[in-house]
Image: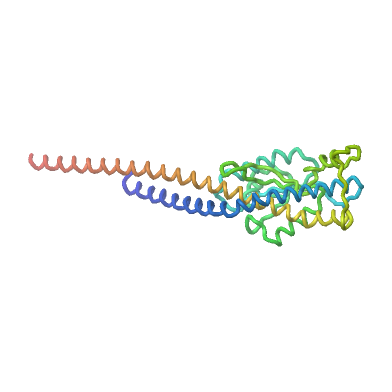
Amino acid sequence: MNIKDIDEALEEGQSLKAIAQAYSEIANLKVKKIRANVERNRLFYNEISRVYSIVKAFALKKKITITKPKNRLCILLTSNDRFYGNINSSLINYFVGLSRELADVDKIILGKAGINYFRAAKLLPKYQEIMLKKDLPDSRELAELARLSSEYNQVLVFHSTMKSLMIQQATFTDVTAVSLYMREFLVKHLDPKNKEGFMRFIFEPDLPKVLQFFDTQVLTLMLEQTFLESELSRTASRFISMDQAETEANKFIKEYEALKAYTKRNADNNTILENFATMMAVKR
């Protein structure tokens, strides 16, 4: 490898380092911007889900149901963009492992990463593809997704969540609150035999209307939160990935700078030897 080849490699390394730095800085700013809001909203959405489950548990106890044509839906949230590390592949593996165990289930794959993977791997015999304009849906896309979800008795959204800046975890959220607190409230709070935990509620308006409200408006809110959780997790993963890429670029640059110095020193030594050989030849 000559000096020209080494300079070209160094130029590529510097360009990659600059790109990694830019993505890392943007991701860092974005994490700081949305992290506090998302973590603060978690408590709110957990409480909303808890109330949702109470309403459903009471409706089940009183044999009030909203008839829905389909049983269960699994939604996989992946990204359209790149440079997120292995977060999409980990989420896809988690989704494939769990969804295989569920019977009578429809599947929706959102995002270019998931769609491209399942088109190539052909692991799922039947699923629906939805490509959003961006990783976060606009109001129209969110409303359409909520409409599709409202046809099912249970909707499980598979997404990533940020445990810490270094740890991103694949998980799923039951946005229809069928499994979250249902059993707990039926046993502990809605059984008259349990005098200590028994709870009485008065619903205004009546229970069917409250249940209808939760199955439409609250469902949309719960879906939106899963997208925000995914966005925060992916952004944190990008920050870590780009930071690692910058570190690798620095190692690459350091190695090629040392190689350049070595090659230049060899070239200088060869020039000196050639000049010396020429002088000796002239003297003879």
Query: Residue 170: where, in percent of width, then height?
Result: 65, 42
**The residue positioned farthest toward the bottom in the image shown:** 140
Q: Quadrant of the C terminus?
A: top left
**The residue positioned farthest toward the front in the image shown:** 196
Picture residue at 45% right of the left edge, 43% below the top: 248
Residue 126 visible in rendering:
no
Residue 278 visible in rendering:
yes
Picture residue at 73% right of the left edge, 55% below the top: 221
Q: Is residue 8 left or right of residue 74?
A: left
**The residue positioned farthest toward the left in the image shown:** 283
Total marks placed: 0
242 or 258: which is nearer to us? 242
Rendered view: 30 above or below 88? below
Picture residue at 57% right of the left edge, 46% below the top: 237
Q: Is residue 88 left or right of residue 188?
A: left
* Quarter residue 168 falls in: top right
204 or 77: which is nearer to us? 204
Query: Residue 277: where, in percent of width, then height?
Result: 15, 40
Q: Quadrant of the N terminus?
A: top left
Rendered view: 61 above or below 140? above
Query: Residue 190: where, in percent of width, then height?
Result: 87, 42
In the rendered view, how is the structure colored?
rainbow
Query: Residue 196: where, in percent of width, then height?
Result: 86, 38
Picture residue at 44% right of the left edge, 49% below the top: 17
